[in-house]
Amino acid sequence: MAFLGDLLTSVADRGRALINFERFASNRRRPLDKLCEDLLSGRGEASGMALAQAVLDEWERLDEAGRLGFFRLLQEHFGPDRERLDAALERYRDYPDAEAIGQLHLASEPRRQELFRRLNLAPGGTHVLVRMRETMFEAMKQEPELSAVDADFRHLFASWFNRGFLVLRRIDWTTPANVLEKIIRYEAVHAIKDWDDLRRRLEPADRRCFAFFHPQLVDEPLIFVEVALTRENPSRIVDVLSEEREVLPASSATTAVFYSISNCQEGLRGISFGNFLIKQVAEDLKRELPGLDVFVTLSPVPGFARWLGPALAEPAELGLTNEEAALLMQAPAEVVALDEVTEARRDKLLGQMLAHYMLRARTSSGRVIDPVARFHLGNGARLERINVGGNLSDRGQRESHGVMVNYRYELDDIEVNHEAFASRNTVVASSSVKKLLRPAKH
């Protein structure tokens, strides 16, 4: 990958030298909309690269208001060519053959898609476009109609970041420091406190970390997963991350635990890499360590507390008494003061409500509510176990009342489980999880 990065940098430098950007310096004094129109006019490859660079340079100089104006420009003036589309529609009405369908397809494409393709010609263009989309998320909060522009970004990124272009790389303590710094910064599940904490996650024989990279973002991980090699399915994150834990020889491990998966590029939101990552890492680990036969996660449930609070307003709907609902609504300080019997009762109720949340609760559109659950279940995992007290950190208490879950990836069952979830919204769960459900309200 380092060689590939050097090669790409060399090619980009050679391109800049050949293009002679000074020849196009006047382009930078032209309005941004004119530069974009010139870029779409197709004046030749060399001038196209120079114009693309000029547009991106101007973009970098814009303030927040200027960037919002640019997004409006993309929406209002770089949609489909109306005259071309009308002509294609007329041609299709007269002769609806394959050629007419092809012309209609091309004419209906917004011009901004081709603009994005040409901007991608500039050295580093892919990286700038990813950051451009990240900026647009804020703009969409003010003007939701910009979602049409976002749809074009998403359409192109889905092709540009196709699995065939991604490179899986192991991250270890010998990985260049600039990449390791990004692992620390991008970790989104269990914060990495410092370099010593990172070293504990990468260097021991029973720890692994893998990331996907793209050739156009050489030292920028797209997504990474941290793995613990164990002899058992853990129920608490503190056991995985403990500084005092005993290091296990990798050859003695029977279980691979995916305990943290972090997306790194906000501008690639909605572009799925995680399903490919988990499956490939599982296959690679199985080849490296044939003794591994269990692949599980130790996952957060970030939507649970947000759902449970309002749901407890109608305890009967959950099969709860008012007294049980009051116990579940207690503040963290009150929970700490509970006696052992009451605490055990509350823990049992939490497990039952988590089972209800996963197996019965749905959004208004009928989807499973929890985003992490949708990710793993959609990838073909099985909901294996509910772990009350799995994460007692402040974040864990705030998001899920301390509950974590294990999803299990049975390599032979992934496709069947995925199909059940994708086509019927069926949550494949173990018998131990199903037993936690209270009788359904009739």
Image: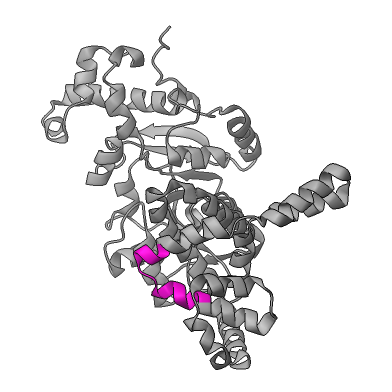
Magenta highlight: main SS = helix
| In magenta stretch: residue 76 | no
Question: Residue 251, position in %: x, y?
Answer: 51, 57
| Pick the front one: 268 or 43 | 43
Q: Residue sitting at 38 percent across and 61 percent down?
A: 186
Task: Determine whether, in the image, residue 344 is placed left or right of residue 47.
Answer: left
Question: Residue 442, position in %: x, y?
Answer: 43, 6
Q: Is residue 6 above or below residue 336?
A: below
Q: Is residue 213 above or below residue 429?
A: below
Question: Residue 195, position in %: x, y?
Answer: 30, 69
| In magenta stretch: residue 62 | yes
- The N terminus sits in image quarter: bottom right
Q: Is residue 252 visible?
A: yes
Q: Residue sitting at 20 percent across and 14 percent down?
A: 323
Q: Is residue 299 above or below residue 283?
A: above
Where residue 438 sits, quadrant-wise, is: top left
Where residue 117 sits, quadrant-wise, is: bottom right
Q: Residue furthest top?
A: 442
Task: Determine whether, in the image, residue 317 is placed left or right of residue 223.
Answer: left
Q: Is residue 183 above or below residue 253?
A: below
Task: Determine whether, in the image, residue 176 is placed left or right of residue 348.
Answer: right
Question: Residue 241, position in %: x, y?
Answer: 32, 54
Image mark count: 0
Q: Is residue 432 visible?
A: no
Q: How is the image coloured?
A: one colour
- Specify the segment rendered in magenta: 55-67
| Pick the front one: 141 or 292 | 141
| Pick the front one: 216 or 267 | 267
